[in-house]
Structures are given as C-alpha cells and as structure tokens.
Amino acid sequence: MSADAKVAPRRSSQLVWGPLGALRGLLGRPLASYYLLLASAALLVAIGLVMVFSATSVRNLGHGNAFAAAAQQIAWAGIGLVVFWTAQRLPTRAYQSLGPPLLLVSMLLLAVLAIFPAGSAGPFRTYQGIWMQIGGLHLQPSEIAKIALVLWGAAVLVRKGRQISRFSELAMPLFPVAGLLLILVGLEDLGSMLVLLLIFLALLFVVGVRFRIFAAMLAFGLAGVILLIADRPFRLRRLSVFLDPASDPMGIGYQPMQGLYAIAGGGWFGVGLGESRQKWLYLPEPHNDYIFAIIGEELGVVGSVVVLALFAVLAYSGLRIARRVENPFARVVAAACTIWLVGQAVINIGAVVRLLPVTGLPLPFISAGGSALVVVMAVVGMLASFARAEPAAARALHARPPGRWMRILWAPLPPRPRGRGSTGGRA
C-alpha cells in the first residue's frame, strides 16, 4: 500500500473527528454551562425584540407610532437585564428564603383577581381575571406564581429528604398549597395553569417520588384540567375546533388557520424580515402567542430551526447545571426551571403548528409581555448563579479570579467547593 493511501484515512478521520473534538473541548471548559446559558438566552431575547417590532409595526403605525410596542418591550428587557444582574449575584441560600414571600404575594394577587376579575378602583384595575394594572404598571400574577412554586416547592421537598417516599409527608403542605394555586390560576388562565402543573410534576419527578404518588398527582392534575375545560363552553369549543379548524374558519378556527398560512408562506428561507403578509391585520396576536408563526413566515424553516436550536441549547445547559451543581436545592430548582421554560415553549410552538390546542401561552423570551420577560430573565440569572457554583467552575474562578472591579460590577466569587472532585480544567 502506498504512503498516500495510508495517510488518506488518517486525514479523513481528522476531518470527521476534528469538529467533534473541538466541541467536546469547548463543553469541557469549567464555565461552559454558564456561557451556553447566557448565549442562548441573550440570542432568544434579541430575536424576540426584533420580531416584536416586526409583528407590531403595522398595527402601531395606524396609531401614529410604529415603534410603540417595540419600545415598550425594550424597556421591559432593560428592567429584565437589571433583574438578571441582581439574580446572578445572589447565593443559593438567598433563593431558599425567597420562596415563601413570593408565594404569599402571588396568591394574594391571584385571590384579588379571582374576587374582582374585571373592575377598577382608583389607579388599580383588573382585566379578564388574568392581568392587573397598578398605575402605569401592568402585571400578570401567574408569572410570579410560576417562579414562586419552583422556589417554595423545591425548598419543601429538599427539606423533607427521604421522607418524600411517604404520601403523608407530601400531603402537607405541598399538595394543598399547589392545588389552591392551580385552581386560582386555572379559573381564568388555563394555559398558565398547565405550566404550573408541569412545574409541580417536574418537582416531584426530579426529587424522585414513588411512581404511584407521581401517577396519582398526574391523574388528579389531568382531571382538574378536564373539569376546567368542561366548566367553560369556549374551552370546549376551542378543543373541538382544534380537531377540525375548518368547522369554524371565521371564529375560533380563524387564528390557527391564519397561523398555518403564515408558516406555509415562509417556505425554507422566509419572505424576508419585516415582510410578513399575515401581520397586516390577518393574524390575531402576531406579537404574542402566535409570534412563532411570524418567525416562520419571515425567516422560514431556517429561522424557525434556529429558534428551536437555541431552546435546545438552553435545555442542555439548564439540565447540565442541574446535574453538576452540588447543592440539592439548586439541583432541583435548575431542573424544574429548565422543564418549565422548554415545556412552555413546546406548548406554544405546538399550538402554532397545530400539534396542540391553542392555550394563549406566550413563547418565552420572544413574545411581547413585560411580566413574562422579566420573570424568565430572573430565572436565567438564578441559573447563572448556580452555573458559577458548579464545583469545576468555582475552582476555576478561585484559581484565576476576575479583577476586583469585575467582581463588583458583575458577580462575586461563588463559594469554594468542599471536596476535591474534578479538576478545574473540566466542567
């Protein structure tokens, strides 16, 4: 065999394994989880700001300012950035103490919405039992309830330890509090109730409760969803139209059909950024729960796949943090938050492409909405704090600490890991 023939397979192997080896090297860095999380979240927020402007410019132009909704979303993103910066500086023990007050505040606000679903008193107003306005501040309490349930539920489950194998230990206080929260939200906002149910089940799954307990809670949750659907005729109608949108093409089936037209019109590469036809008063809520349809129309299959890939990276980084962080509370919270964000994205996108019924849920990071954006950026900040506390990441930061001003302006050093574990070169 000639020398060239011997070298050829080696070169081919290098071409195949070279990129994979480089990727493995990048993922082996101590702060890989941290940077993957920040990069995916930042890109999703940036895409969201661009698409909110594109989806709302036509409607807002009729009111005299094409930039109105985009400017408002940028302002919320600025608030979210401050919240993120604060959240990623907090230690894990701070989050363990935040759960009860957040849960109390969210339940009080939800109770007000349940008692006064639509009304006003001075600067205070409520809308459809879902939103409230206090002065110039618009708030959706169910968004606060999501992060409150994660923090409080994780603290309760971790504190109980091995006792979670007994149903009696879970019956108080976790089940009644979570059940009340689900009822308060589900009365008017079934979509958010589904996300809260997903968070609740994720907490039980992550801590490893017995299968029969998990199955019983899943059955109770699904039964509650069925009862809430049966309680409101429009929900039953929406479910029937999901099975056959053509049965009501100018009513409940109008939005799903227009969303499909938008995606189908985009093709592989889209009609171009800002060139959507469906946003010209054809597609309802193009900036909110159907913003993925505008992405599909303007950016095509390629743009849609990029968004899906970013959520996949977010899922990988969140679950990687949950697997590597030492603190049990942080591990449970990281996994539950990841399942929440990615699960909500799946529900939203599934509704747009008609794999799931329409629930009205926003697409995390991308849809217009202040409360939702600020809360998810707070979650990213919390996950970033946990990522820096991974043993390998913490050792690397202590071995080569950032400058004093960087620690003051960005984030302090995480606690030094207790054991030796892995070296600082691998995360």
Image (cartoon, rainbow, N blue to C red):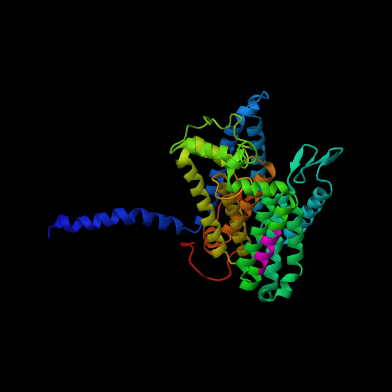
Residue 71 to residue 154: above or below: above
Residue under the point 59% across and 51% down: 347
How many numbered discs sit on the rendered protein? Answer: 0
The answer to whether residue 398 is seen in the rendering is no
As rendered, which of 306 and 287 lies closer to the eye?
287
Residue 270 rendering spot, x and y as whole percentages: 47, 35
The residue sitting at 56% across, 32% down in the picture is: 278
Residue 273 visible from this viewpoint: yes
The range drawn in magenta is 216-224
* Percent position of residue 115, x then y: 84, 49
| Among the 4 quarters of the image, the one containing residue 282 | top right
Whether residue 262 is situated above or below residue 7 in the rendered picture: above
User: Magenta includes 222?
Assistant: yes
342 sits to left or right of 372 = left
Q: Is 331 a magenta residue?
A: no
Q: Residue at x 54, y 55 (%)?
A: 315
Viewer-side residue, 306 vs 346: 346
Q: Residue furthest right?
A: 121
Q: Residue at x 46, y 41 (%)?
A: 301
Tell me the quadrant of the picture where the N terminus can be found: bottom left
Q: Where does the image place residue 286, in percent across and percent down from the top left?
A: 60, 36
